[in-house]
Amino acid sequence: LYKSSTKAYVKPIKCKTSLSYSSTSLKYGEDFVVNLKKSNGDPVKNKKLIVRVTNKNVTYNLKTNSNGKAIVPIKYLGTLKMKISFPGNDMFVKSSTKADLTVEKGSTKIKGSDDSVGKGFNYYITLKNSAGKALANKKVTITFNDKTFTKTTNSKGQVSLQMNYKLGTYPIVVSYDGNKYYDSSKLSTNVKIVEPSISISKIITAAKDLKVRVEYINILNKEYSVNIDGRKYTMDEFAYLMAGALTNINSGSKANVKIKDLSNNYNSSGSKISGKLYKAEYLKLAKNVTSFVNENKRIPNYKPTNLGKMEANLYIYAFTAALDYYGNHKKLPSYVTVKTSLVRGGYSISISQNGKILNYRQIFDSDVFAKYLKTGGKSALNDAIKKKAKQLTAGLSSPKAKANAIFEFVRDDIRYNFYTNSLKGAKGTLSSKGGNCCDKANLIVAMCRSVGIYARYSHAKNCKFASGLNTGHVWAQVYDPISQTWYTADATSRRNELGNIKNWNTKSYNEPKNYALIPF
């Protein structure tokens, strides 16, 4: 017996691919989709495609999505001659195809929001193409009540007309004249102006949001408000709406609840309460609030219950809890738990300065927060920053999810460079893909503000890092309006998460400060 060995090189066999496309004719605004597939029909994802429109001398470099599809921008009418190719790689065989695509003018459609609208509310008009895509920056003409209005559609393809007219039914005519790429369209219908009201489903959605805000901060007072369809409602107005919703739900009615214009003229006062408010009690309370408002044009400062004199802010919270439960379970709860501390305690606006540079709960105030949306200085924007922020947050709905996507990009894709103070600003940090703590914060702040997320800077001296370094440090904070909380966004280490700093001791620092614009 003897020991022997051999070597062999196994050459992998490349997978064959094929290209196909969705159609040879379409209307302007519809998608021309290219598919890249394996020989077995499975999609080939995240691969580069080259599309050349030869008779227009235009080339598009595209990338297939998770379904192996890529959408080709169509910017011309007439016949487009295309050469579509996949260059291949070490795993896939290259492939190509040709297409003669005929593009006709796109059709359009105008749609009104509802047949009826509450007095004082907006009537919304939407302009879309044949693919159902909103058409922005298009002029439409509205004829209503013997007056003509010309308005330009927003990014959602919408314009609105406020219905400050007498109750009744009115004809409305909306027209779009079309342009080089789109045909004209017209809507002729009737709009009925009724007493303003809100659907139970919308009241429930707003109640859920209010409940979350109260439980995060443990405060509820008349400074709060809720927004439904872009209109602000004071706490007494919303209490009336919730009371009506609870009464309707209990009686099996799905009817909208009429709106009351109130002046927020109430003074919440009552006994210290902690216990269960049973169904019969909170339904009785809802009816009593409705009756009181109808007679006195304000909500009661308190109402007697089996638990004692319940102050207004606490029964408002009780209504949110009952509606939140109904929204989740499609039935009213047998009881809701109420505590005075839920609306009076657990939070102080004068929380210590130390807390303000870390995760920090703060009641939203549009006037105070406005400065955290204004870009400038080292957080100044350019097209590249706006484009990247929009790309990172596409498809995300909540501000916190959007902020996290931006934070993770800066943390993972922008390398850390050691130097002092801001050197590159947001623009230079993105283009060079590197920056120190100041410039990483500059980029986070700029990108967040560009997509409507409130963001600011935090700075402290003598921050003690795990490496042993003891130094001044800068990081970003982003604001989540749902939880009404500022979250830390320290992108200097991959160990850090949004709201969780791990690479330095957050219990050891001094001279903490926050800035709308960084001064160094």
Image: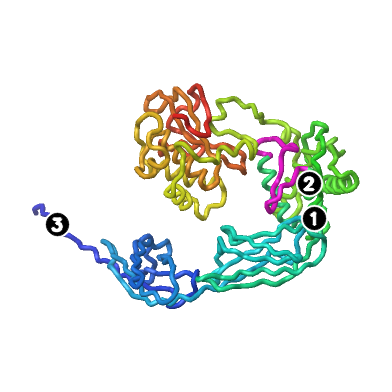
Question: At which x and y percent is residue 500?
Answer: 49, 36
Q: Report the amino acid beneath label 3.
A: Lys
Dividing the picture into quadrants, the one containing residue 321 is top right
**Which of the 4 image quarters holds residue 101?**
bottom left
For residue 237, the mark is 2
Q: Do residues under tags 2 and 3 come within 8 Å of each other at their CB atoms?
A: no
Q: Which mark is residue 7?
A: 3
Residue that lies at the very extreme toward the right in this rendered image: 295
At which x and y percent is residue 463? 44, 25
User: Residue drawn at (20%, 63%), measured in percent from left and top?
Assistant: 11
Residue corresponding to mark 1: 257
Q: Please, what secondary structure does the residue beneath circle 2 have? A: helix
Q: Residue at x 39, y 44 (%)?
A: 430
Q: Does the magenta segment cover residue 226?
A: yes
Instruction: Tell me the colour scheme of the image.
Output: rainbow
Q: Residue 350 at x, y = what percent? A: 64, 26
Residue 39 in view, yes or no: no
Mark 1 Cα-neighbour bin, 10 Å: few <14, some 14–19, many ≥20: many
Q: Looking at the picture, tell me which residue is in the foreground, 464 or 127.
A: 127
**SS assignment at label 3:** loop
Amino acid under disc 2: Glu
Is 17 situated left or right of 487 in this image? Answer: left
| Above or below for 106 versus 375 | below
CB contact under 8 Å: marks 1 and 3: no
Say which of 57 and 444 sits in front.
57
The Cα atoms of the two marked residues, 2 and 3, are separated by 82 Å
Q: Which residues are magenta?
A: 214-235
Number of other residues with Cα within 10 Å of mark 3, as a class: few under 14, some 14 to 19, many 20 or more: few
